[in-house]
Image: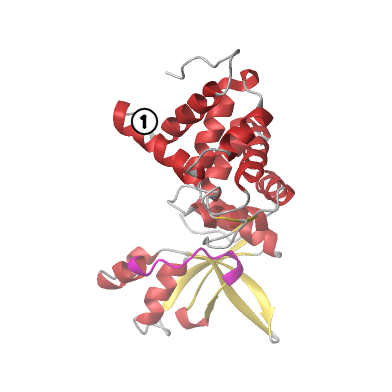
Amino acid sequence: MLYKPTKDKTIRRVPVGSLVLYTLVQRELVKSLVNHIKADFNQDAIGVLHVVIRRIKGLDTYLIVDGQHRWVAMMELGMESRLVEVEIHNSVITDQQACELFLRLNYKRNIRPWDTYDKSVKAELPFAVAITKTMERYGLRAARTGGADGAVCAVGALTSVYWMDDGVTLDKVLMMVTSAWGRTQAALEGRLLSGLALFLHHYGPLVEPKSLIPILREFVTGPGGVLAAGGGIKAMIGVPLIQGVAMEIAKLYNTHRRTKRLPPMV
């Protein structure tokens, strides 16, 4: 079937060297993937690169939204003059729309959690905006890499917790860990956050969240100790680590209560 141009999309063949990366919407470059494409290069397997047109320094410029690794491989192979097929998305005129396009084109691929979250924020998708606002409420911010207090790398965990109940449990989790342990990297470890979320979601109204805060704060070895104890439960009975963390928190909770103790999780 012949391709029929529409107002929204146009197919053209253009030189590889005439393309530029749309850096705002790109995920982190995976060098091993570039090397794999170069080692077994096949022009027919390159397929279509998805681009938008922007006016830069008075010239119409093709910006790559999807096809970063293929383009980098061809550039490194010295193929600047070779023609490649591009699909121009004419209706994409803002950064927000470009991020939405990136997500649509990559939703079935194994994209790193940070890249998905980052583009979702830039696309102003409701769930990502809600997660960001919840973090900001507790003095936190999302980050590609950790190190600094208040920087949350575990955006995949935050997203999973958000979808448990549209952010209700996420708000409780971040309130509790920051109240008990501050904004340290140890307190913001993804498996710990997920384990606490599982605990809260599993027991629901049986738990008084504010009464758990001093229990967590007084735990001798801090957040790392809770995670390690969860690992011990995992090794002992073969449950997933996140469930082991949830079970350890349930044990701590019951240890400090005379009445209304929680039933076993398993």
User: Which residue is drawn at the image coordinates 53% and 62% (left, top)?
Assistant: 147
Q: As shown in the figure, which amino acid type bears the numbered disc 1?
A: Ile
State the image coordinates of residue 183 (x, y, percent, origin top left).
Answer: 62, 52
State the image coordinates of residue 246 (x, y, percent, origin top left).
Answer: 48, 30
- Classify mark 1: helix, strand or loop: helix
- The quadrant holding residue 95 is bottom right
State the image coordinates of residue 243 (x, y, percent, origin top left).
Answer: 44, 30
User: Which residue is drawn at the image coordinates 47% and 68% (left, top)?
Assistant: 68
Q: Which residue is mark 1?
A: 233
Which span is picked out in magenta?
Answer: 23-32
- The quadrant holding residue 236 is top left
- The quadrant holding residue 238 is top left
The stretch drawn in magenta includes residue 26: yes
Q: Is residue 232 visible?
A: yes
The stretch drawn in magenta includes residue 125: no
Whether residue 103 sits left or right of residue 241 in the image: it is right
Q: Is residue 92 visible?
A: no
User: Which residue is drawn at the image coordinates 52% and 47% (left, top)?
Assistant: 156
Mark 1 Cα shell of 10 Å, populated few (<14), some (14-19), many (≥20): some
User: Which residue is drawn at the image coordinates 46% and 30% (left, top)?
Assistant: 248
Q: Nearer the viewer, residue 263 or 45?
A: 263
Quadrant, the C terminus: top left
State the image coordinates of residue 165 (x, y, percent, origin top left).
Answer: 63, 30
Q: Nearer the viewer, residue 171 or 98?
A: 171
Q: Residue furthest left?
A: 40
